[in-house]
Amino acid sequence: MKIRGERECTECETRWSYYETGSVGCPACGSLRSVGVDERTEHTDLQVAFDLTPVRNAIDEADTDDVAVRARDRCREYVRRRGFVNAGTLRELDDTYLAAIELLHVSDIVAREISLEDREELYFLSLLRDADQGERPSAADVPRSLRAARGLAYANAVREYRRDVRTWAEDRDLTASERSALETLGEHVTRIRMLDGDVDLRTAEQLVDATRELANGLRGDEVAFSQAEERLDALSAGPDG
């Protein structure tokens, strides 16, 4: 949505940026009465902290399924509030978001699993340890039983990112090639989601790489755009194409 993010309090005339604080309240006097002093700008990224420390602190005192429920709920809230257009600027599809959405899916499985294998539990704990630092386990570390969770998580992440890209691009004149690449990206997302994420992990990683290159291309990087087109073509002919 488009908002006037630069605010001025009508009570004390303090100015602040909603883009930075995520708050409509005046930071000086607390008043909720303010006026916008800039032009309306696209903004989908709400300010939200992602800190899994309280969940990690519960590991020694709670059952694994209970820890998984806490992790799932915290990740769901973060993913729900995150967006990728900040004050009119298109953000990256970052590793913190990818780790959070994968942990969301894995936590849901762990919370419901009656008999959890050691490798599955260790993988869940490794995600929980590093996700809020933007670190993701390598594809080689993903247990076979959780590969679909990563595939589906990444497809859902790209779906949300692509939605914001389309919103960001509404005020821009995309070329036919750019529009076609966005449509092709959407088709790959749909295919992976229809398979419930059960694809080769290289496909999931290539989907993320193609998305990042396409975003850079839409920002004006012609080399990145060409790389995105090549990667999207490779996805169609890849292990799951």
Image (cartoon, helix red, strand yellow):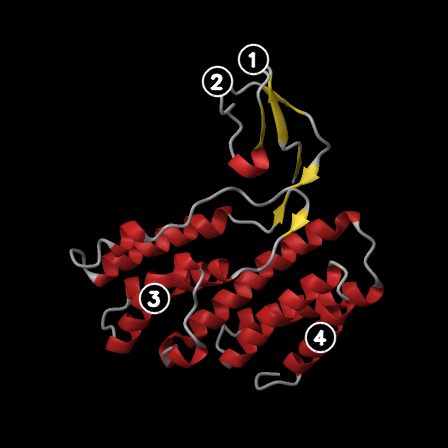
Whether label 4 touches label 1, CB < 8 Å: no
Q: Nearer the viewer, mark 2 or mark 3?
A: 2
Whole-Å distance between the Cαs marked 1 and 2? Answer: 8 Å
Amino acid carrying mark 2 in the image:
Cys
Q: Give the residue number, with chain letter if any, for mark 3.
A: 109
The residue that mark 4 highlights is 227
Tell me which amino acid carries mark 1: Glu
Question: Which quadrant of the figure has residue 62?
Answer: bottom left
Quarter that holds the C terminus: bottom right
Judged from this view, the residue extending furthest toward the left is: 61
Q: Are marks 1 and 3 in contact (CB under 8 Å)?
A: no
Q: Secondary structure at mark 1?
A: loop
Q: Evaluate if marks 2 and 3 touch, with contact meaning CB atoms under 8 Å apart.
A: no
Which residue is found at the position 51% from the left and 81% from the top?
200
Q: Residues within 10 Å of mark 4 (few under 14, many from 20)?
A: some
How far apart are labels 3 and 4 at the CA level?
35 Å
Q: Circle 2 is placed at which residue position?
A: 29
Q: Left or right? Give the position of 148 relative to 16.
A: left
Q: Are marks 3 and 4 in contact (CB under 8 Å)?
A: no
Alpha carbons under labels 2 and 3: distance apart = 46 Å
For badge 4, the amino acid type reads: Gln
Considering only order in the chain, which callout, 1 or 4, is on the residue closer to the N terminus?
Answer: 1
Q: What x and y, as percent, mark residue 149?
A: 43, 70
Q: Is residue 34 visible?
A: yes
Above or below: residue 204 compared with residue 57: below
Estimate the spatial distance between the alpha carbons at disc 1 and disc 3, rounded to whole Å.
50 Å
